[in-house]
């Protein structure tokens, strides 16, 4: 194997690394919105998972399949209904929930299809976001929310508090909650209000309450 | 009356490649209820089968294809139909994989078909040949795989009718297939596709030289009917964009229209050429039988009406591929298969390739498609430790 690829694999995005750390080796994983397949590729080679991906962009899908990954073109909003219950050990939805048309339905589908779901999203409660909107009066743009208001794919932004409330209403159990700060440092969420202010991203390990 | 095709019985008897005489001990049951024996299966191989016999890729050919994937065709002298895909260093890398292709049952390139002599009567089968299905084709291919001692195919692939066979293989013999790449196909033949086939068949049967299917005995050949069938079908393999790009309204060797019914337009001349070269290498009755096999293909119907039943508990690793401008086997047909595979949480990839070349795109130089083929095969090879 060329060294370059190994180096590349060893340095995936910090939030993807945190997700990868939550996944047990040799498990079955579905990565929804898998993008260029870097998480799947990492999991395949370092955790020997049976991994599948779903990606909205056909160009992304083609690139993934050409890398040897099992990926289909699909939409989290419309294509999760096909899968049987508990088909996977983990269903991953990273930085995508806020771009779905119906996050509530999607979240319910995640914990149905997977014995566990791993969800990450940009926290709209972060102090920088609040500052930009509250003080500057402008739509926020941060490292986690890099797009202008007119070209963002995000249509259902939420805060960490909003998300945990949705989990409660869907009877979804939060097994682990991690806030990631602007420097990419993870810390377990103990005080939700504190995390909601200083976490740039939220990362949750979830399961259905059975 | 045009001449007889170049792949006469004499030529067919001496084609290069492997041969298997099947049904000697036990006739092969057909889906129509009959039993068939004895018969010959002709196949061609590329590359070398490894010691573990774990590197075999079965390529299934389409309606008018045959087992000659690469290199000059022994009858026509033209390049093989998958020249761009099968060979050393190509996606189906013959330095690495053992690639084989079997002429389908009912065909006319060495495997027994309606133009061959029925040992019971001493006359060509003609319309006494049993009606065969995609399932029967696959069943006959399995005889070859068994004969070669291949426990499990590393991959089964093919486009169009070849994709149907790949699906049938995965559904009927999931333990004998590690991965499947059905390309530009569907789990059932659509009404529109049956309609086009019916036009082709009627053109053949309307030719007086068809003689009720008995043309071989009469020393005739329904080449005009078969040629029209090919012309009509060929249009369905292209796309409006491709036809326009290739021909537009360009005139053929003239500067103005002739106010007659000559081939004024290049597109007419092209189609006539397609028709006339086709009759040189293909048998009209084979065309009837093989189009019928495609019409009858409905994988869900074989599994209680639900496509998911065809794939329950499958361990086969799938890669479905379609092309944006293919209106014969459009993307939604492949997606229906993907949905069924998702419903059983099967291991499936699905790729739609942007191309304006229509259904024929799977035969042509499509770099992105070839990258996907190579990548999927590489990923699959890594999973079973099939190293270079």
Image (cartoon, helix red, strand yellow):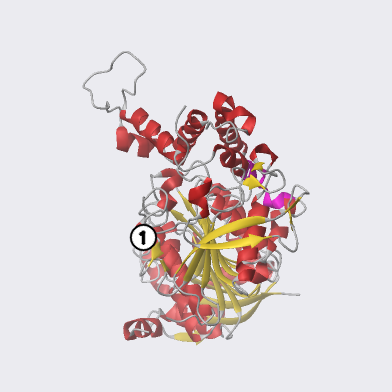
Chain identifier of the residue bearing label 1 in the image: A
Residue B226 visible from this viewpoint: yes
Residue B77 is situated, as x and y percent measured from the top left of the image, at 36, 50
Q: Nearer the viewer, residue B137 or B162?
A: B137
The residue drawn where x is 35% and y is 33% is B270
Q: What are the residue bounds of the magenta stretch?
A: B292-301
Q: Which residue is mark 1?
A: A137
Q: Extreme front residue here?
A: B122
Q: Quadrant of residue B258?
A: top left
- Tell me if mark 1 has few (under 14), some (14-19) or many (20+) residues whose alpha carbon lies within 10 angstroms of its own: few
**Could you tell me which residue is drawn at 37 percent across and 34 percent down?**
B273
Secondary structure state at the residue bearing disc 1: loop
Q: State left or right for residue A139 relative to residue B199.
A: left
- Decide whether residue A13 is among the magenta residues: no
Query: Considering only vertical position in the picture, is A195 above or below B210?
Result: below
- Residue B246 vs B165, above or below: the answer is above
B202 vs B93: above or below: above
* Residue A98 image point, x, y percent: 50, 63
Tell me if residue A79 can be seen.
Answer: no
Residue positioned 61% across, 37% down in the render: B194
Question: x, y percentage for residue A112?
Answer: 68, 68
Residue B295 magenta-drawn? yes
Decide which of B154, A32 is in the foreground and name it. Answer: B154
Magenta residues, dominant SS class: helix
Q: Percent position (x, y) of residue B359?
A: 46, 45
Front-most of residues B267 and A23: B267
């Amino acid at each position: 194997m060329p060294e370059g690829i190994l180096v590349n694999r060893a340095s995936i995005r910090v939030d993807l690394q945190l997700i990868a750390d939550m996944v047990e080796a040799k498990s079955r994983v579905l990565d929804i919105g898998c993008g260029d397949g870097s998480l799947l590729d990492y999991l395949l080679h370092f955790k020997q998972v049976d991994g599948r991906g779903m990606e909205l962009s056909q160009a992304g899908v083609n690139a993934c399949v050409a890398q040897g990954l099992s990926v289909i073109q699909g939409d989290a909003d419309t294509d999760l209904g096909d899968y049987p219950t508990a088909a996977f050990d983990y269903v991953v939805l990273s930085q995508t929930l806020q771009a779905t048309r119906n996050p509530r339905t999607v979240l319910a589908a995640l914990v149905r299809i997977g014995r566990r779901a791993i969800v990450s999203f940009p926290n709209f409660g972060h102090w920088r976001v609040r500052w930009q909107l509250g003080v500057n009066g402008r739509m926020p743009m941060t490292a986690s929310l890099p797009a202008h208001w007119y070209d963002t794919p995000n249509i259902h932004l939420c805060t960490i508090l909003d998300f945990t409330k949705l989990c409660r209403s869907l009877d979804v159990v939060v097994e682990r909650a991690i806030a990631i700060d602007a420097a990419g440092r993870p810390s377990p969420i103990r005080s939700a209000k504190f995390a909601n202010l200083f976490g740039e991203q939220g990362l949750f390990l979830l399961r259905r309450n059975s | 009356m045009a001449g007889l095709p170049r792949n006469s019985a004499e030529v067919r008897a001496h084609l290069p490649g492997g041969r298997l005489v099947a049904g000697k001990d036990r006739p092969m049951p057909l889906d129509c209820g009959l039993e068939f024996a004895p018969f010959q299966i002709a196949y061609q191989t590329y590359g070398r089968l490894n010691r573990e016999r774990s590197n075999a890729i079965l390529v299934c050919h389409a309606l008018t294809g045959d087992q000659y994937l690469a290199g000059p065709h022994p009858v026509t002298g033209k390049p093989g139909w998958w020249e761009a895909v099968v060979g050393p260093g190509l996606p189906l890398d013959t330095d690495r994989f053992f690639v084989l292709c079997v002429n389908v049952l009912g065909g006319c390139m060495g495997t027994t078909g309606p133009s061959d002599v029925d040992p019971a009567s001493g006359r060509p089968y003609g319309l006494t040949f049993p009606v065969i299905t995609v399932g029967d084709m696959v069943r006959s291919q399995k005889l070859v795989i068994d004969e070669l001692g291949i426990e499990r195919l590393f991959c089964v692939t093919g486009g169009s009718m070849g994709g149907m066979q790949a699906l049938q293989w995965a559904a009927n013999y999931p333990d004998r297939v590690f991965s499947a790449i059905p390309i530009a196909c569907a789990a059932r033949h659509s009404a529109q596709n049956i309609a086009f086939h019916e036009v082709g068949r009627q053109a053949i049967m309307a030719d007086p030289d068809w003689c009720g299917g008995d043309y071989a005995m009469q020393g005739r050949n329904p080449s005009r009917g078969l040629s029209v069938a090919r012309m009509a079908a060929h249009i369905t393999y292209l796309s409006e964009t491709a036809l326009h790009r290739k021909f537009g309204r360009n005139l053929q060797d003239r500067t103005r229209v002739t106010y007659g019914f000559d081939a004024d337009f290049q597109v007419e001349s092209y189609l006539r050429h397609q028709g006339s070269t086709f009759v040189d290498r293909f048998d009209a009755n084979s065309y009837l039988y093989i189009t019928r096999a495609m019409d009858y293909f409905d994988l869900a119907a074989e599994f209680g009406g639900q496509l998911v039943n065809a794939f329950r508990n499958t361990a086969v690793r799938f890669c479905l591929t379609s092309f944006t401008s293919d209106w014969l086997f459009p993307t939604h047909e492949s997606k229906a298969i993907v949905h069924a595979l998702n419903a059983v949480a099967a291991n499936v990839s699905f790729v739609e390739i942007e191309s304006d070349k229509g259904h024929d795109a799977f035969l042509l130089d499509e770099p992105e498609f070839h990258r996907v083929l190579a990548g999927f095969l590489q990923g699959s090879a890594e999973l079973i430790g099939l190293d270079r």
